[in-house]
């Protein structure tokens, strides 16, 4: 089946530094990718929609200057957490529906990134 | 905006027994897709089953089946012959049928325990 690779799986960074998370579709093209955030024992909350070749669309309440999204190609989207603080510690998950398929095509998920800011 | 509600934070089932997880949703759209995802301790999201709203027939995948009641906006998941490996968080999710790539809206999840 289709595979979405997310890297790194976990990262620890110091407060004030920036962290980049990559999301790659390995065997299909995705003009759109989604970034979710999941706090412990909670659901996945959509942060933003990443669009290849154009600006990302952010959900209400998500700081676009803090969570920079770049969709550089049809197989790669990156999420950069800038000036990270302990409250940014969370589990970040990307997903990608294959481009060109019907609406019933499932969105494949990356394995997630556990970010800890110390 | 669409909302998805899972009213059971935790459920428990004995191995080999059957359990039903509840999900209700709210939408004004007529066409959409509903999903159940499993999230084991690894936290990898795994698709369990999907249902297309315009199909009246309930979806089934081996031991997993759904009871889709469109008028009641209900979408429950039945797991038959429960196995230890079924223990996980289960999320119900909604996606609009409009557009080529729509976002998923998730419920709050149900943690399923499977006991011997």
Image (cartoon, coloured by chain):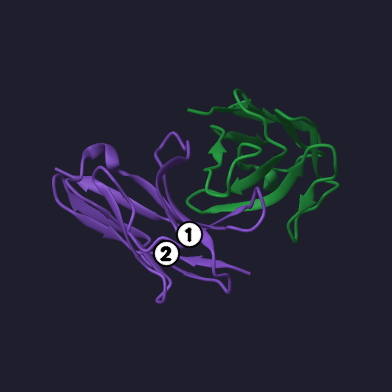
Give the chain ID for the purple colour: B
Q: Residue at x 27, y 37 (%)?
A: B85
Query: Closest to the observer: B78 or B14?
Result: B78
The tint of chain A in the picture is green
Tell me if I can see residue B99 in this picture: yes
Chain to which the residue tagged by mark 2 belongs: B
Q: Tell me where residue A85 sits by quadrant.
A: top right
Secondary structure found at label 1? loop
Q: Is residue A63 left or right of residue A47?
A: right
The image position of residue B51, as x and y in percent, is: 42, 55
- Quadrant where the C terminus of chain B is found in the figure: top left
Q: Tell me where residue A55 sits by quadrant.
A: top right
Q: Which mark is residue B108?
A: 1
Q: Is residue A66 left or right of residue A49?
A: right
The image position of residue A29, as x and y in percent, is: 67, 30
First-in-chain label (2 vs 1): 2
The image position of residue A104, as x and y in percent, is: 52, 48
Q: Residue at x 66, y 37 (%)?
A: A99
Tell me if I can see residue A14 in this picture: no
- Quadrant where the N terminus of chain B is found in the figure: bottom right
Q: Is residue A36 left or right of residue A41?
A: right
Question: What is the C-alpha distance between the residues marked 2 and 1?
Answer: 6 Å
Secondary structure found at label 2? loop
Chain to which the residue tagged by mark 1 belongs: B
Q: Which mark is residue B6?
A: 2
Q: Are marks 2 and 1 in contact (CB under 8 Å)?
A: yes
The image position of residue A8, as x and y in percent, is: 63, 25
């Amino acid at each position: 089946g289709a595979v979405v690779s997310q890297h790194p799986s976990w990262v620890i960074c110091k407060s004030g530094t920036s962290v980049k998370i990559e999301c790659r579709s390995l065997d299909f093209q995705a003009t759109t990718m989604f970034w979710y955030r999941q706090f412990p024992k909670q659901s996945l909350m959509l942060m933003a929609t990443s669009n290849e070749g154009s600006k990302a669309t952010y959900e209400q309440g998500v700081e676009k200057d803090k969570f920079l999204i770049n969709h550089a190609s049809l197989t790669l989207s990156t999420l950069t957490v800038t000036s990270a603080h302990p409250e940014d510690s969370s589990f970040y998950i990307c997903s990608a529906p294959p481009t060109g398929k019907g609406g019933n095509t499932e969105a494949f998920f990356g394995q997630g990134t556990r970010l800890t800011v110390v | 905006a669409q909302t998805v509600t899972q009213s059971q934070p935790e459920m428990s089932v004995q191995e080999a027994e059957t359990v039903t997880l509840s999900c209700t949703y709210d939408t004004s759209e007529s066409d959409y897709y509903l999903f159940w995802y499993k999230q084991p301790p690894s936290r990898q999201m795994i698709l369990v089953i999907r249902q297309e709203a315009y199909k009246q027939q309930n979806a089934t995948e081996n031991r997993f089946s759904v009871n889709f009641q469109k008028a009641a906006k209900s979408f429950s998941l039945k797991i038959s012959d429960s196995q230890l490996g079924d223990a996980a968080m289960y999320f119900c999710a909604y996606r609009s049928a409009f557009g080529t790539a729509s976002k998923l809206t998730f419920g709050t999840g149900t943690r399923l325990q499977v006991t011997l």
